Image (cartoon, coloured by chain):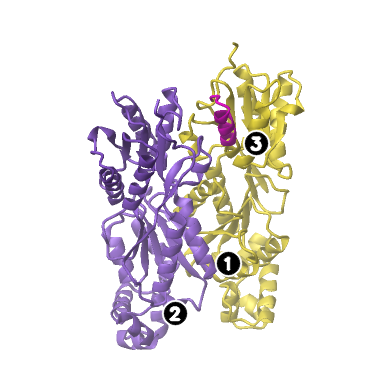
Chain colours: A purple, B yellow
Amino acid sequence: MAVDEGRRITITAIAREAGVSVPTVSRVINGRSDVAPQTRERVEELLRRHGYRRRAARARVSASLIDLVFNDLDSPWAVEIIRGVEDVAHAAGVGTVVSGIHRRTAPTRQWLQNLRARATDGVIFVNSDLAPTVYAELRRLNIPMAVVDPAGVPAMDVPTIGATNWAGGLSATEHLLSLGHRRIGFIAGPRRLLCSRARLDGYRAGLEAAGIAVDDELIFQGDFYHESGYAGGRKLLDLDDPPTAIFAASDQMAFGVYEAVRRRGLRVPDDISVVGFDDLPEDRWSSPPLTTVRQPLTEMGALAARTVLRLAQGEEIESPRVELATELVVRDSTAPRSTG
Amino acid sequence: MAVDEGRRITITAIAREAGVSVPTVSRVINGRSDVAPQTRERVEELLRRHGYRRRAARARVSASLIDLVFNDLDSPWAVEIIRGVEDVAHAAGVGTVVSGIHRRTAPTRQWLQNLRARATDGVIFVNSDLAPTVYAELRRLNIPMAVVDPAGVPAMDVPTIGATNWAGGLSATEHLLSLGHRRIGFIAGPRRLLCSRARLDGYRAGLEAAGIAVDDELIFQGDFYHESGYAGGRKLLDLDDPPTAIFAASDQMAFGVYEAVRRRGLRVPDDISVVGFDDLPEDRWSSPPLTTVRQPLTEMGALAARTVLRLAQGEEIESPRVELATELVVRDSTAPRSTG
């Protein structure tokens, strides 16, 4: 396999085959810019063909780095993932370079150039729908990749770490059923994301297992953001036969429901139970503290870091996709259905 | 000045004076480990004496990096600062290496070693009370430093970016006074931090300017965390003559007050007004959305990044300490005192 070849091939052999000097190959490997483009192309083609592992060589020269790339650092759970990645990387003596790239208009070329120049050991994308050309380019450079994917993106040929969204949706619904709720509203995430569909299907499966028909009137299409939770909460509370509990597919939407309930002069959980999905740090500080489905974001980041570090050392990965377990965290926003 | 000398001195001259080869000086400059300790000492002493700017030289070889170091990545405002630093660094083609070091037992030596090996262009500490030896070591290595300091630490001989805590405390208090409140509770941050004292003094100054005597019974000693806000809220609500408004010196403590109010069966802002301090993203999603004093954390991070990048290029900094303006953000947690 390519991995074993990678252990055998030497820079000297590559230089000989490319008809260039050893320092030139070295410059290409280390991402330096003082190499003619055609020479670089030729050397990289050979490195790739022989499965040369550029990181193992460079690790001796300078401290290692991995890149952690977010679509957007505004994400409420960004810091949870950073903590997981940084913990593992630090323990391995590796620095974590954090970037947010999607706020920028034409970031890709500049970003790839920086990535190459800093000779990163691997790249972790978070929930990224980066252009396929970026993946292709990183693959061409033999840079290991992994994707942390709380949202569910279509399968790529890259190790991906997700969460058990369907099981999470099921457990939240079962919790509300166990408290006696029968009319349970659901505020869904964006339809295009697999995680949204999985959470919705978990909700449906829970109801069906309890012999309760799914009522489409109780399902509101949200987008994970606060405003849509607020809108969904208002709509559901306005129904002739309103739900006694609402399960929102993100914590931010659950807080939107809180606000809809408050403005109606009602109280959580006395008048209506609310469950979220994510387990952001602020759930503990909300009033009341939010019952939610925990996504193990820190653990997902840690596993992604271990994955790229293993790939960088030429190890093989067991499975292209791993889902870590979600877990119901019961706090004070859910209560038995009042039988008044 | 050292800066001008830095432009004149060459690696060749240093090598000659140290009695070593040019590649050896180069290895020292690039933080490589294959140099004998005594040689490294001698070369570094000469580099320092001549004010050699190691970064300007290295920037040609490899992409630049700056290090952003938190005591603890658990901080609720960590990601705000990361965004500010990363934005500026990215625009300059510089990568941002994020670390959290205080959770670790003996991090310093390993961390310094990594820092040196990756040849960082500069280090930004966030609210750090790192050992003086670390500062000394970075100074010895000629690595530029800046401190982002939302908490207020004693002055060091390092450029520091803070916020106008006293003015923030004053503006929150004036806001509550303008709504007719006269008995205003205050939940303070840890006494050892300068920012806590500045916010408290701003509160006192606001009351005194309005001709209201400061009542020590209305001041509760908190620690910035949620639990202490909850405890403070309970204590203040239990007074024989309770306040009609509470100003908490952090957003987390303000959310603790929310919870104390909720458990008492009361409502914010109908029964009591609450103001926080920080302006975390989740303030917009709290129920009700929190009136608070905004610390410009993202701007503070951005300024710190610009500062170390300027220092890395040999520029001089105007002032060792800069405070960026805080700003009152009025949302729904404050209302006129009910005159019922």
The residue at 57%/49% (across/down) is B75
In which quadrant will I find the N terminus of chain A? Answer: bottom left
Q: Can you identify the residue that label 3 sits on?
A: B231
Q: Earlier in the sequence, mark 3 or mark 1?
A: 1
State the extent of the magenta-drawn residues as a range.
B254-267
Chain letter belonging to callout 2: A
- Looking at numbered disc 2 in the image, what kind of residue is underneath it? Ala
- Looking at numbered disc 1 in the image, what kind of residue is underneath it? Leu
Percent position of residue B168, x then y: 63, 32
Left or right of B242 on screen, residue A157 = left
Residue A261 picture quarter: top left
Q: Nearer the viewer, mark 3 or mark 1?
A: 3
A153 magenta-colored: no
Question: For this rendering, which residue is in front, A87 or A103?
Answer: A87
The lab-note entry on whether marks 3 and 2 share a chain reads: no
Q: Can you identify the residue that label 2 sits on?
A: A57
Percent position of residue A95, x then y: 51, 65
Residue B44 higher or lower than B171, as above or below: below
Chain letter belonging to callout 3: B
Q: Residue furthest front?
A: A339
Left or right of A205 on screen, residue B54 = right
Residue A280 higher or lower than B267, as above or below: below
The residue at 34%/84% (across/down) is A4
